[in-house]
Image (cartoon, grey):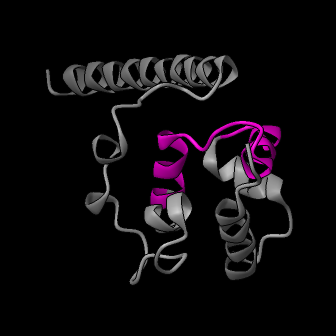
Amino acid sequence: MTKNVYVKNAVSAIKMRDGLTTQKEISDKLGSNPSHLSEVINGSVPLTKQLIYKFQTIFGVNPKYLQSGEGDIFIEGGVKVGNYSPTQIGNSNKMETSADLSKALDEIAEQRKLVTKAQEQIDRLLNIIEKQTK
């Protein structure tokens, strides 16, 4: 594969616009591994539809620019999530790597713990209120 200059240009533009200094900062915001983003830029792995969607929704990058270099790098007026959904760029809701899936599952488990704790606190408060109203 050849180097993806459109992704490289978009990353450079994001860094300049957002005051970021490293590619890692961008990959962190994308929820991607820094080496994966480097591989996409270097052309050793293809630019996925899911990554295009993330660039568009998180940074306001024009999906057409990423794919073909057409148009401006950024969408005029900022991020327009509703104008370019994952179904428009392909039916690809797959996680980038098993590490992404593991990270997502860990986050879900943590959120469940927080919800359970919040529900316990609500139950205790309801018991207190119920006792005081009797």
In front here: 62 or 70?
A: 70
Q: Main secondary structure of the magenta part?
A: helix
Q: Which quadrant does the C terminus fall into? A: top left
Residue at image position (65%, 68%) is 10
Indicate the position of residue 19 as horizontal and vertical percent values.
76, 78
Q: Is residue 14 left or right of residue 134?
A: right
Residue 11: in magenta span: no
Q: Which quadrant does the N terminus fall into? A: top right
Indicate the position of residue 78 as horizontal and vertical percent values.
43, 77
In the current view of this chain or complex, which residue is farthest to the front?
1
Residue at image position (55%, 45%) is 51
Indicate the position of residue 89 as horizontal and vertical percent values.
36, 46
Residue at image position (41%, 24%) is 121
Q: Is residue 121 above or below residue 17?
A: above
In front here: 41 or 55?
A: 41
Q: Is residue 83 above or below residue 93?
A: below
Q: Which residues are magenta?
A: 32-57
Q: Is residue 131 left or right of residue 123?
A: left
Residue at image position (77%, 38%) is 44
Q: Is residue 51 left or right of residue 29?
A: left
In the current view of this chain or complex, which residue is farthest to the left?
134
- Total number of numbered labels? 0
Q: Quadrant of residue 16?
A: bottom right
Indicate the position of residue 94 as horizontal and vertical percent values.
48, 25
